[in-house]
Image: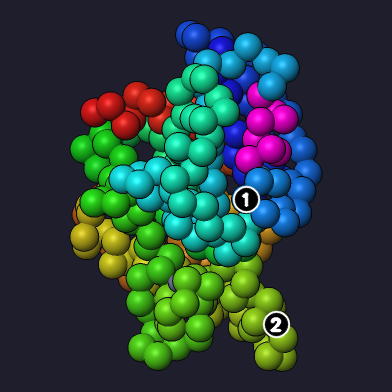
């Protein structure tokens, strides 16, 4: 059996599959507050110990270094674990794969829709992204490429969780919403600022990648009218080529399900 575990800041989603990748079980748990690396590892082992699991797939909100098998940085989980894959393999006899959560969502969408060129943007607490180009997930040299949310939008702008200033995430995310609300702006003005940043990002990525579709999801997209605003600007101003914009249906398990395809995606 294979397990896909998506550890988010508040919730952990677990999906259990058979060898033919049929889903047998889905569960949601509250993510505990991890005091240490050991806490984090024992939480993962507690999820698989009584199951006959031979492949462990982990989806994580943060920068995952595929080359070194580590979680470089995760502001949401407040963790940095070097050689995470090695540490898991020492206690778990099966195969272990790790990946960024939005990259896992992209793997799910690749299977679900079979579209060869697309970008997924998840606007939740942060602004995560995944890029599929010519049927393959783009990872880059160390495996944490395509972090579109951390591309620069405003020179010397607001300080981002990644340590740099002016990232798109600082202007379009749950964190940005909170910051703008605290500065006294009304919701309409906030949505305008966020939609403008998101449109700008989409516009640049379209020129770079010529994707067939942008999939937009995440709590901020589902709870505000950001998608509709961006679509409006998108249609009015026109964007290059025939790129479409699609709002994802809310699916808690998208990253846990996508993580099941990690072995296959890392092979090619
Ligand atoms: Zn950043």
> Which quarter of the picture shows residue 253?
top right
Q: Position of residue 122 (x, y in %)?
A: 51, 54
Left or right of 88? Residue 116 is left
Q: Is residue 209 magenta?
A: no
- Mark positioned earlier in the residue sequence (2 or 1): 1
* Residue 96 marker: none
Observer-side mark, 2 or 1, equals 1
Q: Which residue is mark 1?
A: 37
Relative to 263, residue 216 above or below: below
Disc 2 CB within 8 Å of nearest ligand 1 atom: no
Magenta span: 41-48
Q: Position of residue 93 (x, y in %)?
A: 52, 20
Of all residues, the one furthest to the front in this rendering is 90
Relative to 243, residue 93 above or below: above
Q: Alpha carbon of mark 2 to alpha carbon of mark 1: how far?
A: 34 Å
Q: Which residue is mark 2?
A: 181
Marker count (numbered): 2
Q: Quadrant of ligand 1?
A: bottom left
């Amino acid at each position: 059996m294979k397990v896909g575990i998506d550890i988010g800041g508040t919730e952990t989603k677990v999906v259990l599959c058979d060898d033919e990748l049929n889903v047998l079980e889905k569960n949601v748990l509250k993510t505990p507050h991890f005091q240490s690396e050991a806490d984090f590892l024992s939480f993962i082992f507690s999820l698989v110990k009584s199951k006959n699991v031979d492949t462990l797939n982990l989806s994580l909100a943060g920068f995952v270094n595929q080359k070194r098998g580590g979680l470089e940085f995760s502001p949401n989980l407040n963790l940095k674990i070097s050689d995470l894959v090695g540490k898991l393999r020492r206690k778990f006899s099966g195969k272990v794969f790790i990946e960024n959560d939005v990259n896992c969502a992209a793997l799910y969408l690749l299977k679900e829709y079979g579209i060869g060129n697309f970008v997924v943007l998840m606007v939740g607490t942060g602004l995560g992204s995944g890029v599929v180009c010519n049927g393959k997930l783009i990872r880059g040299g160390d495996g944490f490429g395509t972090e579109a949310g951390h591309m620069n939008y405003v020179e010397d702008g607001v300080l981002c969780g990644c340590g740099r200033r002016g990232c798109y995430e600082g202007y379009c995310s749950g964190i940005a919403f909170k910051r703008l609300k605290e500065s006294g702006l009304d919701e309409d003005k906030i949505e305008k600022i966020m939609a403008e940043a998101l449109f700008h990002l989409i516009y640049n990525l379209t020129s770079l990648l010529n994707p067939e579709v942008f999939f937009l999801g995440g709590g901020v997209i589902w709870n505000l009218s950001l998608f509709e605003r961006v679509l409006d600007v998108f249609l009015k101003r026109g964007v290059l080529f025939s790129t479409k914009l699609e709002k994802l249906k809310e699916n808690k398990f998208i990253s846990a399900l996508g993580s099941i395809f990690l072995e296959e995606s890392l092979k090619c």
